[in-house]
Image (spheres, grey):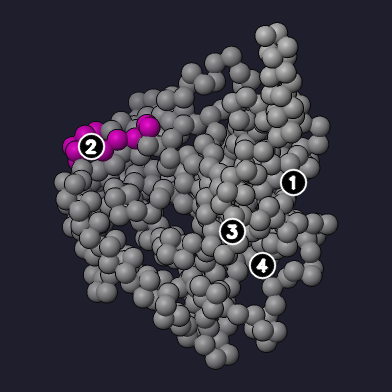
Amino acid sequence: MRLRHIAYALLMATALAGCNDTIDGAIDVSKVKNKVEQPLPGRIVAEMQKKNMPRNSPIMIRVFKEEGKMEIWKAKADNRFDKIADYDICAWSGKLGPKVKEGDRQAPEGFYNLTPAHLNPNSKYYLAINTGFPNRYDAVNGRSGSNLMIHGACSSSGCYSMTDAQILEIYAFARDAFRGGQSSVQLQAFPFRMTAENMARHRNSENFEFWKMLKAGYDNFEVTKRPPEVNVCEKKYVFNQQAQGSGQFSAAAACPPMSTPPALTAALASYEKEYQVAYAKAMDKLDGKLWYEPTEAERKAIVAEKRKGRDLAYAPTGTSLAAGKLVEPEEFEKLMAARLAKQTAKPGQILTASTQASAAKQGRVVLPGTAPGNRSTMSVQTAMAAPAPGAAAPTASQTARPQPDMAQATTTGSVPVPAPNPLAYAAVQQPTETEGKKPFWKFW
């Protein structure tokens, strides 16, 4: 009996040594000798084999702020992408909405291209991957910020911060994909999953029009299960479009004549039809209620227990879903008034209507009935009850849905570009159209 126990213990030790996993499935970082070359855990490699994913096939990263999730999607042998791993984001700062300027503590939202040059093996936060902010969309819209990363250490001031064990795996996914020939990994950073229910729930946000634009790219991926081709023109994102004739995409210039492949057009139309039905149901379900989005402090309060007994640098921030709530308009007004009073009032100061309106703008919310020019609760609900983004006949209050596009979004112009990295393979750069490059839908 004793020999059987010893044999079993040796077998378990061999298995753990082979995949570098701890018993609970997470890598024991303290035992990692070379973090840059650390292989993916055996459990992930086995799942890749099960899903018919070549070890060095391309990957894509998706982020959903609200629920605090980061997903890794990987190409299967048929060139469709499937989710291979997901992680709870340990810390992200600010609130839902894009990064606008240096120091606003916002984590980026949008579509970013990560190259081998964006990998930082020497980060003081264990390992890091630069998000590529600002991209062409950010730059042409005057948005600023630097050193916005996906990194370890669980502490964020505008970054997506993971635990060291998590970033070790994420870094390995990117490293292997680059070594397999992928020249650019797409990072899709969203405020939330762009479902009909979530869009309806956030219909009163001042970021709603920006999010509708991101939704076009989200929809393209949901339909094709391939990262969309991204470009920028007229200071907006466009997805999976082919420029006609000699037209070219320029971030600040008018969009050139563009076309969408018929098969993709039909698929998106079917997806949109289902979305419209779901959006109408979501509006009925909400019944006039408003979503109270929590502050970062309110999110942190939810996970205060996680910080006990840890280093001060370890600062998980929790999820908006856990700390936020749906409320009646009257309660929403009270909650926002209390927040604004706390954020803006100085000793002895009385908040006037204009002060409240200004603070509401800074707080990125539309306060019901705050000041002339601001939409009331009723007007917000009425405007957003119209057909959702992409409808055949949008109302005057809706901006036209951006036309989809085709070129990779890269950092250009005066925005600094990372220095070349030895992992960048010149031999695998994408060929030009004249060299015989086929649009992705030829394979789709």
Q: Which residues are magenta?
A: 322-334
Q: Give the mark nearer the N terminus: 3 vs 2.
A: 3
According to the image, label 4 marks what residue? 412
x and y percent of residue 366 in the render? 30, 48
What numbered label is drawn on residue 75?
3
**Disc 2 to disc 1, C-alpha distance:** 43 Å
Tag 4: amino acid: Thr
Determine crowd level at label 3: few under 14, some 14-19, many 20+ residues with C-alpha closer than 10 A: many
Within the image, what quadrant is residue 419 found in? bottom right
Q: Earlier in the sequence, mark 4 or mark 1?
A: 1
Can you tell which mark lies on residue 120?
A: 1
Q: SS for tag 2?
A: strand
Amino acid on which disc 2 is placed: Val
Residue type at mark 1 is Asn
If you read the primary sequence from the N terminus, does the residue marked by circle 4 or circle 2 appear first? 2
Residue 391 shows up from this direction: yes
Judged by depth in the image, the label closer to the viewer, 1 or 3, is: 3
Quarter of the image for the N terminus: give it: top right
Q: CA distance from mark 4 to mark 2?
A: 44 Å
The correct choice, above or below, for 430 with respect to 69 in the image is below
For residue 327, the mark is 2
